[in-house]
Image (spheres, grey):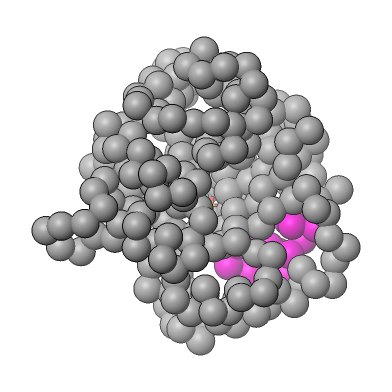
Amino acid sequence: MRNKLIAANWKLNPTSRLEAVNLIEGIKTEIKKTSKNPRQEVVLCVPAIYLGLAQSALLGSEIKLGAQNSYLEEKGAFTGEISALMLAEFGVQYVVLGHSERRSLFGETDEMVSKKSQIALRNNLIPILCVGESLEQRENNLTDSVIISQITKSLENNKINGKNLVIAYEPVWAIGTGKTCSSEEANRVCGLIRAEVQKLYSEEIANQTLILYGGSVKASTIEEQMQKSDIDGALVGGASLVIEEFAQIILKSAK
Ligand code: 13P
């Protein structure tokens, strides 16, 4: 049986240090109220500038720390970038890579994602590798080929073992739109991803790899999604910025 993972992607939020601390403290308090499921992990992927404060705020908590990006080199003349080596120093355990916003707004390619992921793995960070089709691709029946291509290319030269990588299926048209992918379809695509991991690696690795769904996840949608055989958790954007809502998502997915 695979663990459940609920990861928050704060994106470029919140806009003040105080709000960031309040959010972390609020989530910690809410989680303490619920009975813990030892098979569930919670990760907060915060903006890089809040990593230090988040590391301190999460000391002694079971909530893990994640970043939203890291560069494809460890160090050097790459102004403005952050490396996996540095993230590891701040107690970061997870890093979101290849998010559709990075792909579409910052020109990130599968090849870059593959290199970033290799460097993250070398520094013992667990990449949360994001893949997903656009609305146009879906409407043109390209979903499966897009996903397979993203998985194959983004994982090129990556040594994964079933425990050191998480994959998130995030259909681009469901991100921040309020439109959730039906849980049947999300499960079908997550199953397709698992089958591809099996082809690239092994059945054992595919069975151990956590595959999340992301895209307008809410407390009202999570229960049904989590009952599906190939969905092991969620990558949550907007709803992770609202303490009560995120706490409900954690609670409902722990059942
Ligand atoms: P929303 O939950 O706001 O749709 O964002 C999803 C996402 O992009 C998480 O990485």
Residue 20 visible in the picture: no
Q: Nearer the viewer, residue 113 or 126?
A: 126
Which quarter of the rendered picture does the N terminus lie within?
Answer: top right
Question: What residue is at 72 percent from the left and 69 percent from the top?
Answer: 244
The secondary structure that most of the magenta stretch takes on is: helix
| Above or below for 170 versus 83 | above
Residue at image position (50%, 53%) is 94
Q: Is 243 inside the magenta-drawn segment?
A: yes
Give percent across and percent down for residue 141: 46, 15
Q: Position of residue 93 (x, y in %)?
A: 51, 56
- Residue 228: name its quadrant: top right
How far across and down, in percent of the image, does residue 80 sit? 20, 64
Image spot of residue 150 (x, y percent): 39, 26
Q: Is residue 252 left or right of residue 156?
A: right
Instruction: From the viewer's perspective, tell me whether residue 79 is left or right of residue 124.
Output: left
| Start-end of magenta stretch | 238-252
**Residue extending farthest left:** 77
Magenta stretch encompasses residue 95: no
Q: Residue at x 53, y 40 (%)?
A: 164
Can see residue 227?
yes
**Residue positioned most to the top:** 199
Q: Where is 60 relative to 159, above or below?
A: below
Residue at 68% over, 71% down: 61
Q: How many marks?
A: 0
Residue 189 found in image quarter: top right
Q: Residue furthest bottom?
A: 18
Vertically, is 46 above or below 186? Answer: below
Q: Nearer the viewer, residue 74 or 7?
A: 74
